[in-house]
Image (cartoon, rainbow, N blue to C red):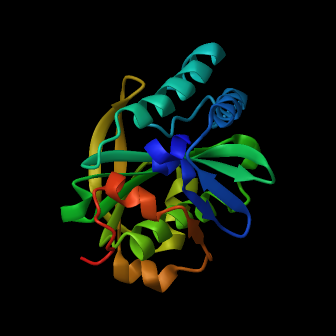
Amino acid sequence: MITDHFPPLGLRLNTPRLELRVPSYDDLGQLAEVAVEGIHGPDTMPFAEPWTDQPPDRVALGVVQYNLGRMASWTPRDWNLNLVVVHEGAVVGIQDMRARDFAVIRQVGTGSWLGRAHQGRGIGTEMRAAVLHLAFAELGAVAAVSSVIEGNRASERVCERLGYRADGINLIEVRGKRAVEHRYRLTRQDWEAHRTVPVTVTGLEPCLPFLGLDGSSEE
């Protein structure tokens, strides 16, 4: 089976409403269609790299190639766990969790997007909570970080609900203009104080060597 050779394909995170998993080819097809249907309004850009500013066929192809590329470039020292988010049997977005030298640093970064038709229903908070549970409860992380382009109130609210604290800013270029990127950091203590979403993780043990771990979640 393919999971014998790439165990992350068998990993599952389940919350009351969602399942998160590494995408199959069929999942990638659905994810590409969600992206084409729209992630944000034309007058806003929530991404540091404005990849949605392309014709629909290029957006769809980019979604497929990017996610396949993350699997192809995976190493235990430098990995990016891209998980499709499934709600009521349909793919609605993507939630990633990434790390470099995780076995030593024990810090993860996260990023995500959700189709516009599925926004405003708390799904963004629930899917982030799922990967934070994986990081802190299952893998022994000490911190999680995230970045939000100024004006993206939906992402800011997710960070606030889950206990992140402001951690400075960066100035970046987006669409040929200067933009402010706000950094957020979540410690284990703050995560424990704000954890409200129950999460079940299955298929993790064979993934541990692929995450640079030896089977222990202890620091």
Q: Nearer the viewer, residue 78 or 121?
A: 78
Residue drawn at (28%, 41%) of the image: 171
Name the residue at 41% across, 35% down: 70
Image location (x, y in percent) of residue 135 = 41, 66
Taking the spot 48% from the left edge, 30% from the top edge, the residue there is 68
When the figure is inspected, residue 66 is found, relative to residue 186, above or below; the finding is above
Q: Position of residue 61 (x, y in %)?
A: 57, 19
Q: 99 or 138: nearer the eye? A: 138
Residue 83 in the figure: left or right of residue 209: right
Depicted 20 relative to depicted 78: above or below: below
Q: Is residue 200 left or right of residue 190?
A: right
Question: Which residue extends farthest left?
Answer: 104
Q: Nearer the viewer, residue 63 or 174?
A: 63
Provide residue 58's location: percent of width, then percent of height: 57, 15
Q: How many marks?
A: 0
Q: Is residue 52 visible?
A: no
Q: Give the left or right position of residue 33, taking residue 7 as reference.
A: right
Q: Quadrant of residue 73?
A: top left
Quadrant in the picture for residue 200: bottom right
Residue 104 can be seen in this image: yes
Question: For this rendering, which residue is in front, 139 or 197?
Answer: 139
- Residue at the (51%, 35%) spot, across then down: 45
Q: Quadrant of the C terminus?
A: bottom left
Quadrant into which the N terminus falls: top right
Q: Is residue 73 above or below residue 211?
A: above
Measuring from the top left, give residue 17's x and y in whole percent.
74, 64
